[in-house]
Image (cartoon, rainbow, N blue to C red):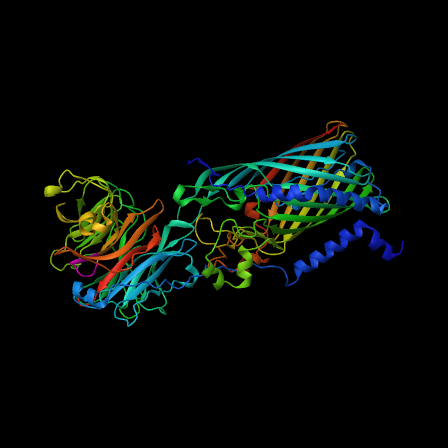
Amino acid sequence: MTSNSAGKNMRIPFFNGFLFLGMFLPAIILLTMCTVDRSGRAIVKTTPWACVGGCGAGGSGGAGGATAKWIGNGVSGGLLDIQAMYSSTATKTSDAKALELRFSIKPTYTGVLALTVPFSSKTGSLQVSALYPPTTGLINNGLGDLRVDYIGAFGLSGDFSYDVTLSVPTGSYTATTGEEKALQYLPTSLQLGAGIYNLSLDLGKTIDMDKGIVLIDLVYSYPFNINFYGKDQYYDFTPQQQNMMTSAEKKRFYYYFKPYGENDLGGYTPPSIMASAFYGYRGMENFVHSFGLMFSVPLGVDWIPSMQNGTPYDPAPDPDNQVWNATLCYGLEFSRSNFPVFIAAYLPIHAKTASATNAQAGNPYDPTPMEDWSRGPDWNDVFHRWSVFVGVKTSLF
Amino acid sequence: MRPSNFILKSPAAIVVSAFACLAFLSCSDWIYKPVQFHTPVPPPPPNAFVSKDSLSALVGTQNVKLAYTKMITGGTQMLYFVDFNDSSVTPKLLKKPGDKQDWSASCPIISPDGALVAYYLVDPSNIKHAAAYCQKLDTSAVPNLIDDPGSDPHFFKDINNNLFITYADTTDEVDATYSMLTTKHTYRVQISAGTGAKTGTRDSIAPFPFYGGMSYDGAYICTGYINAYIFNISTQNFFSVDTGKQTCNPSMTPDSLLTGRMMFLNIGGIQNLSTMGALAGAAFREHQYVLIADTGNNLVGSFNVDQILPDYAGGEWQCPKWTNASNFFCALATKSTAASTVVYDCFIVSIVPTKTLLLNVKPDLLQFNSTSKPYVYIGGK
């Protein structure tokens, strides 16, 4: 087995993200505080069931990992709440371990403002062509895409909630491997970040029941991109070439803002919608069991960049694009007032991809085969990918 | 609460409204959909080529064609040709297959009648994956796939004037014991002399990948890059050349009589050839010599860039290739003039007697490797 260490060619792509955070985070905090205070009506849900948020669909975060939805009593009372969630996600070709630290405060009586800091360690393989065996043992470690989110409650009894999450591209999406003269980008699933911003809106409804609770969420994710340099950081063209481009082509490389999720390598993430329903059972003292189903649909096809570093800009539709993705979820909180522990197991079931049936053969730039809903679930992949989570919470000050 | 108050004062209503608007926009045709991007290819720069009179004085005719590759911004090698018969001698861009615009072209070869060009394209996502093509030497000609994988195509015309292309089905080299790559082959396939399209099925002519083409009589093929060999197809005998030394740019002689000879570029150090005369034991500089050897591993020709091109003394040959005439080869000469630039020009070298002609009389300061793999066709040879 070949052991490779990725990341030789990271060019601080996360600078954009930190710059954005530094400039706009204070404004976001101020804005959200003012907005909630002015409403004056919303009553924050004070039941323990309110301690949800930062759900998986909200972050771009690079692929290959997952984020659990903590359902339980949680912890409260301090000025600063801290949640640490360790996850392990396995697929047939990769293994991702992540630690997410979530720091949250309550700037108002009705809202929660949180910062999530993810760290990942991903192991997998790279196969650039079916003609050659894959390169195995690739490893990529580091910081992922930071997320800032604000949760507010509304409704007569605070049984509705909204969660606005912004993820910023602080994780590297350009890690490479291979010989110096033939560097190859790691697959998207092994990158730590997505290279784009993502704004997600989560609308939630809580239904209290005898010994239990039902949580229903609808999440809309909208990726976009900001470039403080005004031009693509990896591709440049001569003035003569620029003159030969259409205006639409130029906008791919020379921009300050893209109202869609295309990064500087040409990787594209479409908007997506996710619906989820969870039932939490609190019939056992000091335990909360939860069962749920999440169903996510991207409103387009992912495009992936050319894998060869230094070669022309050549993104193409992702043959592994999933037209839908469902996840069966189970969680168990060991409810302790000061130091609750949460464990969970997620089992995804997804649509059969184009690559699973070689449907993408022909024109590799035609996304039509990747949009086909008729292929049904990929039962062969069930149980070959799953995630387990272990999380703790505490409250300080 | 009246609806208007709810909308104006409730942040939740704003969130819900924003949600609905974004969802609506996302489902509409306004949503961005990426499309394939083709790197713009500017027209080739106007170079001043050698005069027709000078060319005729060296090779005996103005019917000369030059095919070569040139890198454009972004890294893709494009394929060009120059026809010195034209009233205006300018480079012309050849077409690539529609779905391989971003693959890099390499090692073009012009057919014995000057009408076709064969070459291979390298997959940008995997530089070891190549596909071989052939087409008319015309800017509007559509490429014909010879094979995928396929690399280093060469033309061969048999005694019945049937035209073939020989090629390898890999880009990996033969090792010192030629024990590896036993699943790889050198193939031969017949093509149409009019269009360059395949007209038959491929035949294996050697159970190893050879990259230097076939001799005039069809008896020999040669290879290099790691170890150099001449291979007798009928007897299946290997002849090791410059044994144990790495060689580059193998090229089989087009001569009709002295058929078992190959040309190659040396790697630095003492060469392991016989009958080297005054050069025996001399440590060569990297790419200092273009060498010719026969099946007995005898040195039968050597071309020192320092002596042949004094302006390039201390520099290197690059990409030497036997032309279709056995008394000429073409090559690039390079010489560093600064840390990151080299003088990079194309020459025809007359083998006997030794004299040279600069094809491009206006030297360019180009990024290394920006122009490469020249092949010269000389009409009537």
Q: Is residue A224 left or right of residue A111?
A: left
Name the spot of residue B43 as percent of width and height, x first. Answer: 39, 64
Secondary structure mainly formed by the magenta segment = loop
Number of numbered discs visible in the structure rendering: 0
Locate residue B243: give its quadrant: top left
Query: Can see residue B200?
Result: no
Q: Is residue A231 left or right of residue A34?
A: left
Locate residue B60: give its quadrant: bottom left
Compared to A19, does B253 lie above or below? below
Whether B324 is among the magenta residues is: yes
Name the spot of residue B349 as percent of width and height, x first. Answer: 19, 56
- Identify the residue shown where x is 79% and y is 46%: A35
- Identify the residue shown where x is 84% and y is 47%: A39
Q: Nearer the viewer, residue A357 or A101?
A: A101
- Identify the residue shown where x is 73% and y is 32%: A81
Query: Can see residue A348?
Result: yes
Name the spot of residue B359 as percent of width and height, x first. Answer: 25, 60
Q: Nearer the viewer, residue A27 or A175?
A: A27
Farthest bottom residue in view: B87
Locate residue A386: give its quadrant: top right
Compared to A121, does B105 lie above or below? below
Q: Quadrant of the C terminus of chain A?
A: top right
Q: Which residues are magenta?
A: B323-329
Name the spot of residue B235 as percent of width and height, x first. Answer: 15, 51
Whether A261 is among the magenta residues is: no
Q: Quadrant of the N terminus of chain A?
A: top left
Farthest right residue in view: B1
Compared to B100, does B281 lie above or below? above
Q: Is residue A311 left or right of residue A269?
A: left
